[in-house]
């Protein structure tokens, strides 16, 4: 499991540092302000990115049981996608960590960004 380092987006800009990914799962510290960028440069045609939710349902008096699914998206060769932010109550573990997987890792890199408020 790879823990990606969060990069801050500031008013002076950011130089993106993408990291190689693990095949099984990847993680980042989630404060609710993070975005995930996934870039595909290899021969893989299309990959699926899945960000795992920690809370899959919640019961409310007004709406009954609500279901929360994993966040998923697809990205093809030569493309970059941005996903997020991820609400802490739905996507973070008790330790404040969020997990994501990709369907292939050859030529696939990712970066985590956070907005400074």
Image (tube, rainbow, N blue to C red):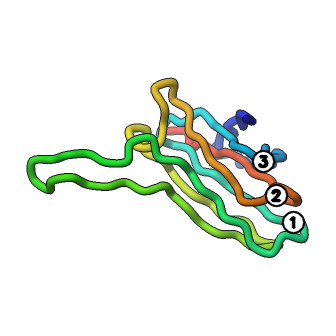
Q: Residues within 10 Å of mark 1 (few under 14, many from 20)?
A: some
Residue 63 horizontal/vertical position (percent): 14, 56
What is the spatial separation of the Cα atoms under label 2 and label 3, in whole angstroms? 10 Å
Label 2 vs 1, first from the N-terminus: 1
Residue at (56, 44) in percent of width and height: 34
Residue that mark 3 sits on = 23
Foreground pick, 43 / 39? 43
Residue 27 horizontal/vertical position (percent): 65, 38
Q: Secondary structure at mark 1?
A: loop
Task: Look at the numbered discs 2 and 1 and tell me whether their residues touch, using CB distance below 8 Å.
Answer: yes
Label 1 vs 3, first from the N-terminus: 3
Residue that mark 2 sits on = 108
Residue that mark 1 sits on = 41
In the image, residue 15 sits, relative to residue 48, either above or below, namely above
Residue at (50, 50) in percent of width and height: 85
* Figure quadrant of the N terminus: top right
What is the spatial separation of the Cα atoms under label 1 and label 3, in whole angstroms? 16 Å
Left or right of 1, for residue 84:
left
């Amino acid at each position: 499991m790879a823990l990606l380092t969060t990069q801050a987006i500031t008013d002076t800009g950011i130089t993106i540092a993408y990291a190689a990914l693990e095949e099984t799962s990847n993680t980042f510290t989630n404060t609710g302000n993070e975005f995930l960028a996934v870039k595909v440069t290899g021969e893989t045609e299309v990959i699926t990115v899945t960000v795992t939710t920690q809370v899959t349902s919640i019961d409310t008096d007004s709406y009954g049981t609500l279901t929360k699914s994993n966040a998923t998206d697809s990205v093809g060769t030569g493309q970059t996608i941005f996903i997020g932010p991820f609400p802490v109550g739905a996507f973070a573990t008790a330790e404040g960590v969020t997990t994501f997987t990709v369907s292939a890792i050859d030529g696939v890199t990712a970066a985590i960004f956070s907005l400074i408020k």
